[in-house]
């Protein structure tokens, strides 16, 4: 039996759904027109009108362009997996060309740059069984494979390097801070694809408050068995990074990933009453309350980003979108 339809109720249902409105204002949503000759600049610009995270990517490019135009001190923070991946070469490009002024990373973000100067990391797959890799002394980060040979070569570099630092400590009585530790390490790198080779040449500081969380820490452990009085000072770097933020007329933050590297740059900018610009690129979401997943507006509540600052979060794998950001915001003339 079909239900009876009251005409007044039908009309009311129609009127609820089809309420008269004016036109919404904003960027027209449309994609790139591939029927025309390809223009990469126009292709990137088309992201602004694509919607969803594509539009956030276009906003990120625009914000970074403004950072550079306003000569903001740019703090680039990145996790170690960015250096594990091919993004290492993009970061090295930015440092070589002095397009960023401060680096913050993890221990892995330092040591893996050094390891790549001795031999390659190679593409594997996410599904390779861990037991089989362990039997071959192959380490897996996502779908990237790192032979244990890289760690042996790193130890062969690190132990003499630590001895050199130790002898200087004994001679001068000065305990080296982590940014100087990384600076001295970069001076040892002759490979021009190395991030820290260029950071040392261009006097761009790199901060890593968790310097022992990786193979660097393992090497320090073994070194201290014979040199137990060897020390690294963390406190000096807190003064250095906060001073860079406070003295900056304009400050911009770019974060690839999350974790302590994100908080470290945000916290330094807290003491200057917030950064003027912020671009986050991450797959992390905010539901668990983590700092890694937090949106820029949460940092505004803490005073880490200015309320009137320009900010955006791009929810994406950085290996997909950071090359586009570099192309659009840093290498547009090239």
Image (tube, rainbow, N blue to C red):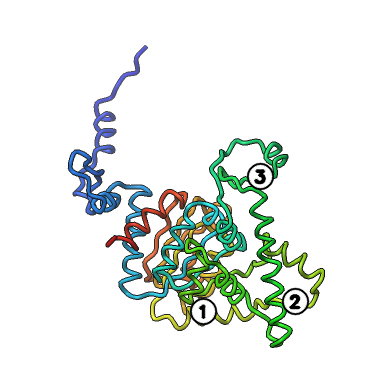
* Residue at horizontal 67 percent and vertical 64 percent from the top: 216
- Mark-to-mark CA distance, 3 and 2: 31 Å
Name the one closer to the observer, 289 or 172.
Answer: 172
SS under mark 2: loop
Name the one closer to the observer, 10 or 84.
Answer: 84
- Crowd around label 1: few <14 · some 14–19 · many ≥20 (10 Å): some
| Left or right: 16, with 244 as reference point | left
SS under mark 3: strand
Residue 299 percent across, percent down from the top left: 49, 66
Mark 2 highlights which residue? Answer: 230
- Crowd around label 2: few <14 · some 14–19 · many ≥20 (10 Å): some
Q: Do the residues labelled 2 and 1 touch (CB within 8 Å)?
A: no
Mark 3 highlights which residue? Answer: 138
Residue 256 percent across, percent down from the top left: 48, 58
Residue 155 percent across, percent down from the top left: 69, 61
- Mark-to-mark CA distance, 1 and 3: 43 Å
Image quadrant for the N terminus?
A: top left
**Which label lies toward us, 2 or 1?**
2
Pointer 3 or 2: first along the chain = 3
Residue 5 percent across, percent down from the top left: 29, 22
SS under mark 1: loop
Pointer 2 or 1: first along the chain = 2
Residue 208 image label: none
Mark 1 highlights which residue? Answer: 271
What is the count of numbered marks? 3
Q: Are marks 3 and 2 in contact (CB under 8 Å)?
A: no
- Crowd around label 3: few <14 · some 14–19 · many ≥20 (10 Å): some
Q: Are marks 1 and 3 in contact (CB under 8 Å)?
A: no
* Residue at horizontal 58 percent and vertical 61 percent from the top: 114
- Mark-to-mark CA distance, 2 and 1: 32 Å
* Residue at horizontal 65 percent and vertical 79 percent from the top: 176
């Amino acid at each position: 039996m079909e239900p009876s339809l009251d005409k007044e109720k039908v009309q009311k249902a129609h009127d609820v759904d089809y309420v008269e409105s004016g036109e919404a204002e904003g960027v027209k949503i449309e994609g790139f027109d591939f029927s025309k000759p390809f223009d990469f600049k126009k292709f990137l610009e088309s992201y602004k009108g694509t919607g969803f995270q594509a539009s956030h990517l276009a906003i990120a490019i625009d914000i970074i362009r403004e950072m550079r135009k306003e000569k903001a001190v740019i703090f680039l923070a990145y996790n170690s997996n960015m250096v594990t991946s091919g993004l290492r070469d993009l970061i090295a490009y930015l440092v070589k060309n002095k397009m960023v002024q401060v680096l913050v990373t993890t221990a892995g973000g330092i040591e893996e740059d050094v390891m790549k100067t001795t031999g390659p990391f190679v593409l594997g797959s996410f599904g390779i069984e861990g037991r089989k890799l362990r039997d071959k002394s192959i380490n897996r980060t996502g779908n990237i494979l790192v032979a244990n040979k890289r760690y042996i070569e790193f130890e062969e570099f690190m132990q003499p390097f630590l001895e050199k630092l130790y002898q200087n400590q004994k001679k001068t009585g000065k305990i080296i801070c982590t940014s100087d530790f990384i600076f001295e390490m970069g001076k040892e790198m002759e490979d021009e694809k190395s991030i820290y080779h260029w950071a040392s040449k261009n006097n761009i500081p790199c901060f890593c408050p968790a310097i022992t969380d990786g193979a660097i820490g393992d090497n320090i452990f073994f070194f201290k068995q014979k040199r137990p009085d060897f020390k690294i000072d963390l406190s000096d770097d807190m003064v250095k990074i906060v001073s860079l933020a406070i003295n900056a007329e304009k400050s911009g933050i770019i974060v690839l990933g999350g974790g302590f590297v994100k908080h470290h740059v945000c916290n330094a900018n807290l003491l200057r009453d917030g950064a003027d610009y912020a671009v986050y690129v991450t797959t992390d979401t905010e539901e668990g309350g983590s700092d890694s997943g937090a949106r820029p507006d949460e940092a505004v509540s803490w005073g880490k980003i200015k309320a009137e600052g320009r900010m955006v979060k791009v929810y994406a794998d950085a290996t997909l979108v950071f090359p586009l950001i570099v192309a659009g915001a840093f290498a547009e003339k090239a």
